[in-house]
Amino acid sequence: MKDIRVAKPYARALYDAAVEQNALAPIIVDVDKLRELIEQSEGFTQLIHSPILSPQFKSEMFQQLFADAMQPLTINFLKLLASKQRERYLVAIMDVFSAIVDETAGRLVAKVTTAVPITAEQEERFVQQLSTYSGKQVRLETVTDPQIQGGFIVQLDDTVFDASVTTQLQRLKQQLARG
């Protein structure tokens, strides 16, 4: 909960600055690059979470790492986070930033959980069906969770569609228990 409270003003500031500088699309690309880097690089994750490294050192590292790869606004934003010792909230800030972008574009985010990874064709069908259902453009986030055994669970805003094998088996067990 604290992460969200800290993240909201920073995410809003990044969004507003990107819009003001007419650089929203490149900043979205930078945020995606950062998200990918955090997922793939243990070293970068340690850098942003280390309480031992000084804010100045982290700022210098951000400048060196991203000088040729990211927008100056993104680099300055990372340096600001380091100077305020808020870089450990970067993931939450990026999540809130993406939510602001989606909301502004009138887009909903649907989280689809499946037991096995889904194909691009299945993703497209989910997007089409959910867009038709909601009347809005839908962006899909997919999660793989073998515990649901099969089927899928879709969360779209406050609505959950649970067509998982686990839930169907639980319902069947309850019906059999009732007689």
Image (cartoon, rainbow, N blue to C red):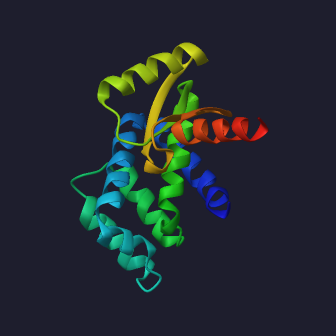
Where residue 90 sits: x, y (%)? 48, 60
**Which sits in the foreground, 111 or 97?**
111
Q: Look at the image and tell me in which quarter the N terminus lies.
A: bottom right
Identify the residue at horizontal 38%, vertical 34% (top origin): 25
- Taking 158 as reference, is 120 left or right? left
Residue lying furthest bottom: 52
In terms of image quadrants, where is residue 174?
A: top right
Q: Residue at x 39, y 37 (%)?
A: 23
Q: With respect to residue 39, does 44 lie above or below?
A: below
Q: Is residue 135 visible?
A: no
Q: Residue furthest front?
A: 179
Q: State the residue in front, 102 or 171.
A: 171
Q: Is residue 108 depicted above or below 60 in this figure?
A: above
Please state the total of marks drawn on the protein image. 0
> Visible in this render: residue 176?
yes
Image position, residue 72 (x, y; %) = 34, 52
Residue at 54 percent across and 13 percent down: it is 132
Q: Looking at the rendering, in which quadrant would you find the C terminus?
A: top right
Residue drawn at x 45%, y 17% is 128
Query: Whole-percent x and y of residue 52?
Result: 43, 86
- Residue 153 horizontal/vertical position (percent): 54, 36
Residue nearest the observer in this picture, 123 or 177: 177
Say if 78 sits above or below 43 in the image.
above
| Name of the residue lying farthest toward the left | 68
**Which residue occupies the extreme right position in the image?**
178
